[in-house]
């Protein structure tokens, strides 16, 4: 007898057995659903391709689906939170702390706070806007003579090197790093630099507010006990609460976002993305068992990795493209990757 016929025969027997056993115990309306569920469970044992990984994927799939749905529908909420929290800190800095700085600080310190604070704010706004509005890059729907290394079974299109499928965006992304809910956008080839620069300048801004506002925070925290004294007005109470709110928020974000920024800086130094980090680790372990050493083909050296990532091709670009807002495009088109890009132009600089 054919294997498929045997499996079908066994499944029918299970279905009949489930029906006979359930007739005397279950209500009529529940017999068919229960029999169907038992059939599904028992059918797993008649599939020669079934293993523990397949069963685990089936069980965990609803969790992935929920994460994708929540991230997709609440993306704008996360963006609103970033804008609202950042705006609240800026409001406190300009309308509460700046008048105090102008009255108490020396002209040198006043100039430092005004220049650095406004530069930091411009960099944060620029890079966050570019990171959210710049498409990460998508591979062409057809091959079009573009080299590809695999085929996406979900998009049904060829996948160039370093591209991966995003379950939230429902498409493949060029040099995908991850999907960031705080941007409501994927981080890929064309906006990876904006994302990292935003994380870096926001961390620096939070550290700046936390360090420079430490003494004000201590004074405001100690002044809470003076709420019952007559000189302590409503305006003073709101000022102290605003200082405490700003210091706690910026200090917390500085620690959390600082750790994330450091991790991404390590990945950039190694010429990897977050996804490639896991892939390269697995490949290194696989080759190590064979006595071979895995080398990342996209690692051009620590300094060159940063130059390629930041788009630095000459010395002046460190100022115009790194320390000042710049909308220049990244190196390459994200479809093909040279082994040593811009080697003659970058290394001598």
Image (cartoon, helix red, strand yellow):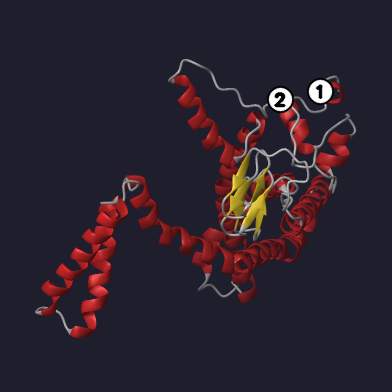
Quadrant assignment, res 130: bottom right
| 234 relative position to 318: left or right | left
Which residue is at the front of the view, 293 or 52? 52
Residue 37 on image: x %, y %: 27, 68
Residue on which disc 1 sits = 343
The crowding category of the residue bearing disc 2, from other C-alpha atoms within 10 Å (few below 14, some 14 to 19, many at least 20), is many
Asked whether the residues under the numbered discs 1 and 2 touch, taking CB atoms below 8 Å apart as contact, a structural biologist would say yes
| 299 relative position to 263: left or right | right
Residue at x-position 66% and y-position 34%: 268
Would residue 212 be visible to someone looking at this image? no
Residue at x-position 9% and y-position 79%: 24
The crowding category of the residue bearing disc 1, from other C-alpha atoms within 10 Å (few below 14, some 14 to 19, many at least 20), is few
Give the farthest residue toward the bottom.
28
Give the farthest residue toward the top.
291
Residue 68 on image: x %, y %: 52, 61
Residue on which disc 2 sits = 300
Residue 257 on image: x %, y %: 59, 48
**Measured along the vertical axis of the image, is residue 205 above or below residue 232?**
above
Residue at x-position 81% and y-position 50%: 119
């Amino acid at each position: 007898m054919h294997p498929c016929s045997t499996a079908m025969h066994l499944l029918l027997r299970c279905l009949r057995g489930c029906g006979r056993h359930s007739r005397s115990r279950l209500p009529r309306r529940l017999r068919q659903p229960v029999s169907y569920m038992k059939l599904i469970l028992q059918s797993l044992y008649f599939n020669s391709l079934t293993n523990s990984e397949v069963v685990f994927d089936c069980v965990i799939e609803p969790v992935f689906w929920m994460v994708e749905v929540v991230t997709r529908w609440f993306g704008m909420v996360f963006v609103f939170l970033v804008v609202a929290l950042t705006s609240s800190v800026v409001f406190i800095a300009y309308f509460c702390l700046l008048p105090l700085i102008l009255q108490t600080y020396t002209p040198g310190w006043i100039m430092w706070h005004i220049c650095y604070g406004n530069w930091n704010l411009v960099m944060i706004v620029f890079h966050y806007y570019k990171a959210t509005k710049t498409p990460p890059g998508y591979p062409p729907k057809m091959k079009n003579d573009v080299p590809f290394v695999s085929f996406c079974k979900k998009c049904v299109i060829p996948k160039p090197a370093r591209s991966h499928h995003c379950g939230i965006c429902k498409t493949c992304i060029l040099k995908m790093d991850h999907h960031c809910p705080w941007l409501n956008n994927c981080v890929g080839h064309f906006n990876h630099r904006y994302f990292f620069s935003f994380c870096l300048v926001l961390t620096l801004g939070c550290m700046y507010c936390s360090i420079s506002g430490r003494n004000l925070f201590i004074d405001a925290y100690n002044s809470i006990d003076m709420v019952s004294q007559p000189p302590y007005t409503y305006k003073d109470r709101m000022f102290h609460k605003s200082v405490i709110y700003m210091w706690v928020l910026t200090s917390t974000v500085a620690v959390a976002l600082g750790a994330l920024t450091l991790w991404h800086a390590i990945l950039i130094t190694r010429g990897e993305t977050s996804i490639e980090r896991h892939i390269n680790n697995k490949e290194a372990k696989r080759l190590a068992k064979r006595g071979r050493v895995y080398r990342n083909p996209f690692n051009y050296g620590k300094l060159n990795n940063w130059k390629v990532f930041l788009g630095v091709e000459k010395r002046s670009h460190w100022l115009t493209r790194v320390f000042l807002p710049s909308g220049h495009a990244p190196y390459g088109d994200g479809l093909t990757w040279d082994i040593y890009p811009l080697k003659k132009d970058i290394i001598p600089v």
